[in-house]
């Protein structure tokens, strides 16, 4: 669940108490639109993009995309416009190509479903093209037009040369951290932008490599499931739910092996790490990126992504805490963030 959806749930419960009854469907939609506009005015662009990517992954969302894209165009933020639409295009075209072989053979259900994903992909392409048009980006317009024509003609894109160039390189733990470091440097340390840098890097690997990357990520993500790190995340973020702690561990991995290992030994080492662009250090998306790219590359559904059986863990490790214990437990973090 995205941060926007969690905030909407909280707003729904608050309105329910005020009304003394559950809000109607129209009232709920009005509440959602108001919250969307509030977050847009607050420039919570990345949170809104994450919401759209999750909620409208396969289709829909035209109104929300148009509103958000307009806000980004006013800021001249082409990078986020590309991030908004490229993932939708990737998801929707992957679903289309997954169904196309059966649709081409006359399977009624596949024809119906593939048409839906085709239309949804074209809608996302059109949104991206309009962003390029509004910001006078001719190369972007030409690329989108070319890809739309290929999809219109049912021509599946061939792997790019750089895909083949790295085909023999396997992702082990050493290579995992190299990829993480390269993605961070390409994004100048910005953890939200790093997601897109990481996406670009991973698309150059084979589907098998992406599965390996996700398995290694899962091992490190599980290893960081400790009460000490959760306490650090709580202080840094001014609160941290269980979902937020998952996002925090994704952020921690994105900072690199040295930061990760030091934080596992001493969470207060994060005093020297957190920067303004890190925000609350809860970045949603790192734990899903492998499945997203694998689905786009293979043309299969994300639900078909191989799942990994991790070593048995007995929940969050270490000694639980109460909020009142944190100042004594983590004095340096409390002084900086408390």
Image (spheres, helix red, strand yellow):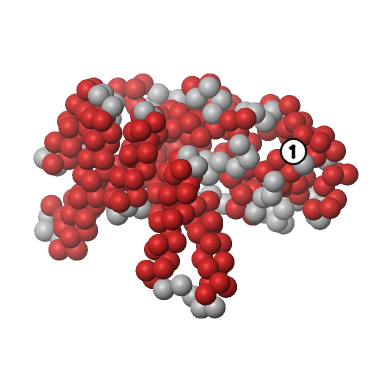
Q: Is residue 188 above or below residue 274?
A: above
Q: Is residue 152 visible?
A: yes
Q: Is residue 234 above or below residue 140?
A: below
Which quadrant would residue 88 be assigned to in this image? Answer: top left
Q: Residue at x 82, y 47 (%)?
A: 326
Rendered-image quadrant of the C terminus: top right
Q: Residue at x 28, y 27 (%)?
A: 135
Which quadrant would residue 140 be assigned to in this image? Answer: top left
Q: Residue at x 26, y 24 (%)?
A: 137
Looking at the picture, how far across and down is residue 294, in whole percent? 39, 42
User: Depth check: 329 or 180 in front?
Assistant: 329
For the residue carrying disc 1, how many other residues have a C-alpha within 10 Å: few (<14), some (14-19), or many (20+)? some
Q: Is residue 158 above or below residue 288?
A: above
Q: Which residue was labeled with disc 1? A: 337
Q: Is residue 158 visible?
A: no
Whether residue 253 sits left or right of residue 270 in the image: it is: left
């Amino acid at each position: 669940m995205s941060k926007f959806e969690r905030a909407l749930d909280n707003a729904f419960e608050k309105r329910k108490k005020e009304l003394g009854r559950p809000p109607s469907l129209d009232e709920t939609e009005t509440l959602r639109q108001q919250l969307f506009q509030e977050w847009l005015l607050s420039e919570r662009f990345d949170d809104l993009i994450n919401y759209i990517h999750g909620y409208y992954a396969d289709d829909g969302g035209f109104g929300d995309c148009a509103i958000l894209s307009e806000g980004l165009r006013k800021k001249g933020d082409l990078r986020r416009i590309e991030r908004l639409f490229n993932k939708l295009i990737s998801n929707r075209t992957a679903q289309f190509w997954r169904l196309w072989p059966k649709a081409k053979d006359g399977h009624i259900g596949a024809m119906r479903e593939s048409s839906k994903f085709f239309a949804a992909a074209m809608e996302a392409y059109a949104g991206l093209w309009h962003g390029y048009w509004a910001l006078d980006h001719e190369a972007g317009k030409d690329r989108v037009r070319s890809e739309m024509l290929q999809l219109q003609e049912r021509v599946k894109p061939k792997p790019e040369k750089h895909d083949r160039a790295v085909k023999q390189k396997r992702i082990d733990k050493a290579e995992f951290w190299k990829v993480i470091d390269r993605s961070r440097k390409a994004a100048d340390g910005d953890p939200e932008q790093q997601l897109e840098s990481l996406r670009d890097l991973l698309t150059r690997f084979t589907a098998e490599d992406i599965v390996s990357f996700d398995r290694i990520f899962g091992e490190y993500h599980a290893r960081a499931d400790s009460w000490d790190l959760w306490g650090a995340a709580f202080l840094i973020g001014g609160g941290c739910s269980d979902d937020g702690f998952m996002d925090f561990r994704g952020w921690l991995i994105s900072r690199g092996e040295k930061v990760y290992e030091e934080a596992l030994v001493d969470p207060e080492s994060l005093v020297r790490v957190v920067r303004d662009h890190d925000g609350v250090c809860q970045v949603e998306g790192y734990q899903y990126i492998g499945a997203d790219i694998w689905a786009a590359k293979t043309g299969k559904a994300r639900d078909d992504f191989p799942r990994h059986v991790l070593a048995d863990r007995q929940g969050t490790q270490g000694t639980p805490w109460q909020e009142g214990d944190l100042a004594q437990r983590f004095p340096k973090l409390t002084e900086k963030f408390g």
